[in-house]
Image (tube, helix red, strand yellow):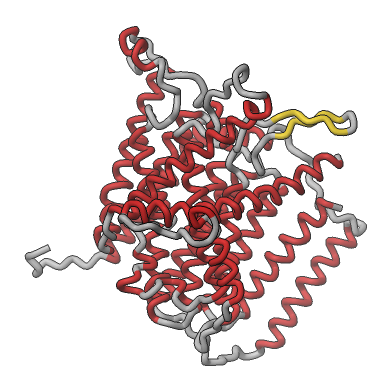
């Protein structure tokens, strides 16, 4: 019972947040909906015994990335509700068709498994005690090459973003 | 099972009680200390030494009218004070208040640790939750529909992101040194006294407690500066600079919603000092005098030690507030990005090399 509640409440919050992201008219509301989704996702990670991943999720996505989103929304002044109501041709048909497809997939999977939703994952051994150290030891031994490649990739991306954004002003002598 | 449920019900209530009582005393203490430093008397009417002044202020704020600005975004305006309070309560949950004790109820013996939730990634939890605290300031500033709060909110988001990076980086050497991310284990790793393999140094340092502040002095300095900036205290209070922004992000708030921001600020301040004491000043460690003091007092000594260390750090906060003028905005950003972050990166490198040599020996030997 407790496990199902611990799954159901964050899951509902994730869906609610996602719906806010899609349907809210105000960009700041959209951003806060995304924060709700990301934070609830962190709670789901905790129930799966992945505390480290949950904390990194909170720190990086809910903390840093979304604060920057909000900062940019406020700085460039798009924090006004949307005025235009553009409609794509056949909008209603497409949306309802996708929804029916989604529901039927879920119902099919449910019937296939005899309505036995496998929500309760078995506890993996030493998940609670050693998650950061386990992660670190596998990351710096067997996965050290991909790890370093990703770090080089990120540095390249940062430098190229800087190079693209920075205007080279040769005429200005002072500064 | 029933004891576990009872314990997990009592702990949050206890935390709530401790935090709210603390805040009442803290606000009074700040007013008294700052008044003393400025040769004033400070609050002295309500109760002995004016200690009930905060309570009177709180009741006054409860009874005040709640104003909703016409151009406010209602949902976010009402949500912001709640987002301010929740993270501050959550952070207090992970501070270890003592070594814990065993209790026997109805034949069942349980070990109760004096920490709200002892999670193995406590340091990350602290950083994650304190990064959520930015939202309250940003949302309050934006949703008020007024220009001064908006400026305060934009300043806050930039300031808190910048100093969070320095704060997080200054904690990494401490984690390396202690070998764990759990708050309780970081406290336990600071027990005992300093020691050295060189006899002359050893005879001097072995009377100094093995607190992280001595080997990690630079990390302590960076963390302390960054934590003042993180809770938006003077000299980093550009978020609510009275001379420029009226009241900053909470200009449009009144009554109890303003009180919630005020409460959150002081709880955050207390949390920061308690966390600093836990990371660098040995947390609840200290002499308990088991034979000299009565058993109950002796058992409570760890909590008293943590309290004393925290109040000591809070006094430094008040002292800095009464002494230093506010930084200019560009100075603030320069201090964060050009000084604190590079220094903490270099310090991380230095301590990683030193710890590597200590644990694995010199690379050529």
Note whether B226 is above or below A165 in the view shown.
above
Quadrant holding the C terminus of chain B? top left
**Left or right relative to B287: residue B233:** left
**Left or right relative to B73: residue B176:** left
Check the image and name the residue furthest to the right. Answer: A114
Q: Residue at x 76, y 56 (%)?
A: A7
**Left or right relative to B254: residue B221:** left
Note whether B161 is above or below A170 in the view shown.
above
- Please provide percent x and percent y for residue A162: 30, 60
- Which residue occupies the foreground of this view, A151 or B345? B345
Check the image and name the residue furthest to the top. Answer: B199
Q: Residue at x 80, y 40 (%)?
A: B4
Q: Residue at x 42, y 57 (%)?
A: B31
- Please provide percent x and percent y for residue B296: 68, 28
Count the labels in the image. Answer: 0
- Which residue occupies the foreground of this view, A124 or B354? B354
Task: Determine if residue A21 is in view.
Answer: no
Q: Quadrant of residue A68?
A: bottom left
Task: Determine if residue B356 is in view.
Answer: yes
- Please provide percent x and percent y for residue B70: 52, 89
Q: Residue at x 66, y 89 (%)?
A: A90
- Which residue occupies the foreground of this view, A57 or B22? B22
């Amino acid at each position: 019972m407790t496990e199902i509640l611990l799954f159901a409440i964050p899951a509902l919050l994730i869906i609610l947040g996602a719906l806010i992201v899609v349907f809210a008219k105000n960009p700041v509301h959209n951003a806060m909906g995304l924060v709700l989704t990301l934070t609830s996702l962190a709670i789901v990670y905790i129930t799966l015994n992945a505390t480290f991943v949950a904390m990194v999720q909170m720190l990086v996505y809910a903390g840093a990335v979304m604060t920057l989103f909000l900062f940019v929304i406020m700085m460039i002044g798009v924090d006004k509700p949307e005025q235009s109501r553009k409609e794509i041709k056949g909008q209603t048909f497409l949306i309802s068709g996708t929804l029916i497809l989604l529901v039927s997939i879920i119902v099919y999977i449910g019937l296939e498994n005899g309505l036995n939703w496998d929500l309760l994952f078995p506890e993996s051994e030493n998940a609670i005690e050693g998650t950061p150290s386990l992660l670190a030891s596998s990351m710096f031994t067997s996965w050290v090459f991909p790890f370093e490649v990703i770090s080089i990739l990120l540095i390249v991306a940062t430098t190229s973003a800087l190079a693209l954004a920075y205007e080279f002003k040769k005429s200005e002598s002072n500064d | 099972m029933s004891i576990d449920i009872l314990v997990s019900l009592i702990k949050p209530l206890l935390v709530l009680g401790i935090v709210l009582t603390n805040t009442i005393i803290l606000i009074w203490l700040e007013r008294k200390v700052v008044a003393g430093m400025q040769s004033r008397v400070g609050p002295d009417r309500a109760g002995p030494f004016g200690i009930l002044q905060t309570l009177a202020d709180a009741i006054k704020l409860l009874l005040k009218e709640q104003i909703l600005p016409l151009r406010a975004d209602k949902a976010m305006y009402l949500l912001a004070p709640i987002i301010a309070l929740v993270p501050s309560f959550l952070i207090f949950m992970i501070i270890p208040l003592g070594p814990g004790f065993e209790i026997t109820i109805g034949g069942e013996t349980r070990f109760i640790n004096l920490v709200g939730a002892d999670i193995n990634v406590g340091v990350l939890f602290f950083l994650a939750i304190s990064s959520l605290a930015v939202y309250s300031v940003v949302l309050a500033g934006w949703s008020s529909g007024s220009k001064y709060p908006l400026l305060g909110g934009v300043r806050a988001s930039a300031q808190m992101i910048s100093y969070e990076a320095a704060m997080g980086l200054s904690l990494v050497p401490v984690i390396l040194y202690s070998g764990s991310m759990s708050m309780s284990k970081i406290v336990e790793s600071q027990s005992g006294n300093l020691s050295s393999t060189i006899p002359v140094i050893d005879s001097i340092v072995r009377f100094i407690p093995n607190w992280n502040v001595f080997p990690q002095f630079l990390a302590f300095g960076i963390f302390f500066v960054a934590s003042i900036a993180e809770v938006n205290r003077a000299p980093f209070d550009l978020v609510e600079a009275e001379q420029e922004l009226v009241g900053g992000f909470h200009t449009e708030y009144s009554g109890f919603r303003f009180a919630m921001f005020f409460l959150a600020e002081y709880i955050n301040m207390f949390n920061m000092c308690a966390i600093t004491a836990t990371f660098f000043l040995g947390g609840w460690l200290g002499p308990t005098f088991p034979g000299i003091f009565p058993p109950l007092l002796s058992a409570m000594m760890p909590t008293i030690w943590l309290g004393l260390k925290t109040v000591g750090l809070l006094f430094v906060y008040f002292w800095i507030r009464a002494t230093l003028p506010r930084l200019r905005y560009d100075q603030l950003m320069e201090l964060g990005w050009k000084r604190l972050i590079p220094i903490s990166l270099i310090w991380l490198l230095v301590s990683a090399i030193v710890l590597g040599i200590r644990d694995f020996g010199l690379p050529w030997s």
